[in-house]
Image (cartoon, rainbow, N blue to C red):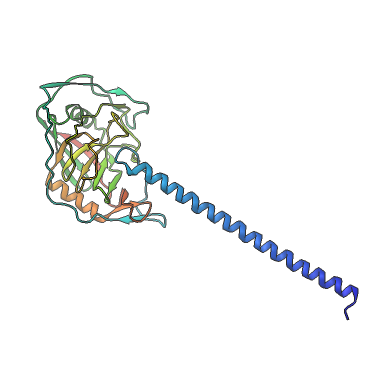
Amino acid sequence: MPTNEQRRAAAKRKLERQMAYRQQRAKKRRIIAVVSTVVVVALVGGGVWFLATNDFGNGDAAASETPSQEESVDKAENIPTALHQIPARPQPLGEKVNCEYTKGQEPAAKENTPPANGEQPATGTVGVTLGTSIGDLKFTLDRALAPCTVNNFVSLANQKYFDNTTCHRLVVTGIQVLQCGDPSGNGTGGPGYTFKDETYPEITYGRGVLAMANAGPDTNGSQFFIVYGDGSNLQPNYSVFGTVDEESLKKIDEVAKTGTISQAPGQGDGKPKTPVDIKSALVAA
């Protein structure tokens, strides 16, 4: 039979084992809690990012060119080849319209001078060529569709506002568009002023359409998007001001096929894996 001293020693050893076990369990719980918090923060952050960028307007999150564990590359599939016919305005504009460019709440992402307020012609077209890292992209701007938008785009191009910028956003799921025009490169920048929408209910979007991105009604600035494929899910909330020629669209197709770096698999909305850097914007004389 064990003595009292032996019983006390055994009890002490048992208590020490219990304390060590409890310490190990507490350590495991702390590790699990930290990991759980990180996961929740990541999921919440991803959800906020998706909600902020799912609508097709200004706003995007920067992404690295090499996918990490939190990123995936989604590629465009089933890109339409037929060019979209832009619906004409139900009521044609007059020879001239009045355009107003209002100082915005945010500073300009790149120095520029806003266009002068006043009348602008509402007829005729203007050719613009973007010299980019994937080759020349050729636009035909149509004043009959959006004269104030055309005037703004030409003004910014002549000031070299688009030079040395990058197309920061590519969407391959739901809609198929490439978004550019933000010197800051993250989707939040603009020229420091805004102007009103030039939309009408009959507007539809599809391959070859050139339109303005925005952050809500009458918040147009410098960001624009090219519909290289499907645009049928877009509401008529974005001013269409021209078209992109077929050869240029083929170059964008190749970018879309290499994919967009998204924050979650299947999201299909993020930075192009193949960069589209604008080196120059030349307005035809």
From the top left corner, tell me how far across and down residue 6 is, in percent. Answer: 87, 75
The front one of 45 and 162 is 45
**On the image, which quarter does residue 216 sit in?**
top left
Image x and y of residue 137, in percent: 17, 43
As drawn, the residue found furthest toward the bottom would be 1
- Report the residue at 21% width, 29% height from top: 198
For the N terminus, the quadrant is bottom right
Quarter assignment of residue 231: top left
Give the x, y percent position of residue 92. 11, 27
Looking at the image, which residue is at 49% across and 49% down? 41
* Image vertical order of residue 198 relative to residue 231, above or below: above
| The C terminus - image quarter | top left
Furthest residue in direction top, as rendered: 118
Classify residue 186 by image quadrant: top left
Q: Nearer the viewer, residue 247 or 123?
A: 123
- Residue 200 versus residue 262: which sits nearer the camera? 200
Q: Position of residue 163 (x, y in %)?
A: 25, 37
Q: Is residue 38 above or below residue 123?
A: below
Side (left or right) of 95 relative to 78: left
Nearer to the camera, 34 or 86: 86
Could you tell me how many numbered marks the image carries? 0
Q: Residue at x 23, y 23 (%)?
A: 115
Judged left or right of residue 200, residue 9 is: right
- Say which residue appears at 86% left-offset and 70% top-offset: 8
